[in-house]
Amino acid sequence: MFLITTASKVGAETARLLAQRSEPVRVLVRDQGKAPALAQAGIEVVQGDLEDPATIDAAMRGVATVALVSPAIPRQELNVVNSAVRAGVEHVVKITSDSSADSPIARRRGQAEIENGLIASGLSYTLLKNNAYMQNFLMQAPMIAATNSFGSSTGDGRIGMIDTRDVAALAAEIAASPAPHKGKTYWPTGPETLSYPDVAAALSKVLDRPITFHSLTFDQQRQAMIDAGLPEHVAEDNAQALSLFARGEADYTTSDVQSILARPARTFEQFAADHADAFS
Ligand SMILES: NC(=O)c1ccc[n+]([C@@H]2O[C@H](COP(=O)([O-])OP(=O)(O)OC[C@H]3O[C@@H](n4cnc5c(N)ncnc54)[C@H](OP(=O)(O)O)[C@@H]3O)[C@@H](O)[C@H]2O)c1
C-alpha cells in the first residue's frame, strides 16, 4: 500500500500514476469533498490532518511506501515521519526543494529541518529537490488571460523549471521501485533553463498572441502576491525566492527525469499547450 500525504498538485498526480499501475493507493486529505476524481480513479481517500498524528497513524496502516508532499511545515511532515517509523514503513519519497538551515527563505529552512529529521529517523528515503514548478505560472494565468502581460522580479535570471507532472512521475516510479534510489538525493529540472522574458516568448508562440513581460521591484512583487491572495509570510518567501532566481541560483538543469524515467522532461511549451485554456 502507498500513502500519499496530500492531494496536492504533485500528490494527486502521483496517486493517479500509481493507481494506473494497479497499485493500492491511499491519499490523506483534509476535505474528502475536494477529491472526488481521485476516489473515482479507485484511490482510497481518507480524511485526516497533518496536524493530527492520530489521523496520520490511521492512514498509515498497512503502508509500505510514503510519498511525503505538503506545504512543508516541519511539525506536520515530522508527524508523518514519526508515524512512518511507528508503522515500520519501508521507504519514504520526500518532495522538497533547494534547502539549507541558513537560507533567507523560511520555507527552505523548514525543508532542511524535515530532510534532516527524515534522515535521522533511520527510514529508507529518497529526496527529490526540485527546481521551480512550471505550474507556478497558473497563478498568473487569469492576469495573462485578461491583460496579455505579466510581471516578476526575476529579471533575466534563468530557471530550470520543471512540470509538476514530471515530479509526480518521478515520485511514482521511485515509490514503485525504491531499491536503486535508496538514500539518494536528486535535483529534478525541466530540459532547459528559461528566463521570464523567455516564458513570455514561449506563451506568445503557443497561444498565438503577443504576451509581454515587465520587471517588478521586490516590493512590487511581494505586494502583487499579497493582492493575489497569498498570506504575507508566503508572499515574502516567494518574493525572496524570485530574487534568488534573478541572481541565477536556479539556472541549472539535470538529466534526472531522463535517467530515471527513460524519457525527456516536459518542455515549457508542452506545459503551456496543455494549459492553453487557463491562459486564454
Ligand atoms: N512551487 C514550486 O516551485 C516548488 C518547487 C520545488 C519544490 N516545491 C515543494 O513542493 C511541495 C508542494 O507541492 P505542491 O505544489 O504539489 O502542493 P500544493 O499543490 O500547494 O498543495 C498543498 C496541499 O497540502 C494540503 N494541506 C495543507 N495543509 C494540510 C494539512 N494540515 N493536512 C493535510 N493536508 C494539508 C492542501 O490541502 P487543502 O486542499 O486541504 O488545502 C493541498 O492539497 C512543497 O514541499 C514545496 O516546497 C515547490
Image (cartoon, rainbow, N blue to C red):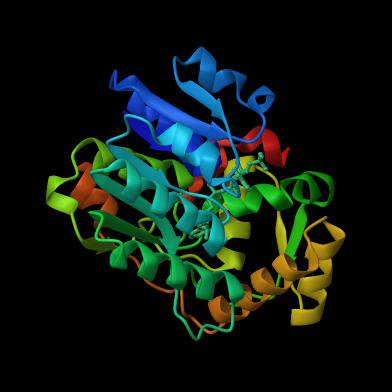
Q: Where is residue 37 in the image (x, y as percent from the top left)?
A: 57, 19
Residue at 72% x, 47% y is: 141
> How many numbered tags mark residues here?
0
Q: Where is residue 114 in the image (x, y as percent from the top left)?
A: 44, 65
Q: Does residue 3 appear in the picture of this structure?
A: yes
Examine the rendered structure and indicate whether residue 239 appears above or below residue 138.
below
Examine the rendered structure and indicate whether residue 62 appears above or below residue 151.
above
The quadrant of the rendering that contains the N terminus is top left
Residue at 44% x, 14% y is: 42
Residue at 67% x, 27% y is: 34
Q: From the viewer's side, name the closer residue of 9 and 75.
A: 75
The quadrant of the rendering that contains the C terminus is top right
Left or right for 235, reference 201:
right
Query: In terms of image quadrants, where is residue 176?
Result: top left
Residue at 47% x, 49% y is: 69
Left or right for 145, reference 37:
right
Q: Where is residue 131 in the image (x, y as percent from the top left)?
A: 44, 63
Q: Position of residue 105 (x, y in %)?
A: 59, 77
Q: Does residue 6 appear in the picture of this structure?
A: no
Q: From the viewer's side, name the closer residue of 154 and 149.
A: 154
Residue furthest right in the image = 227
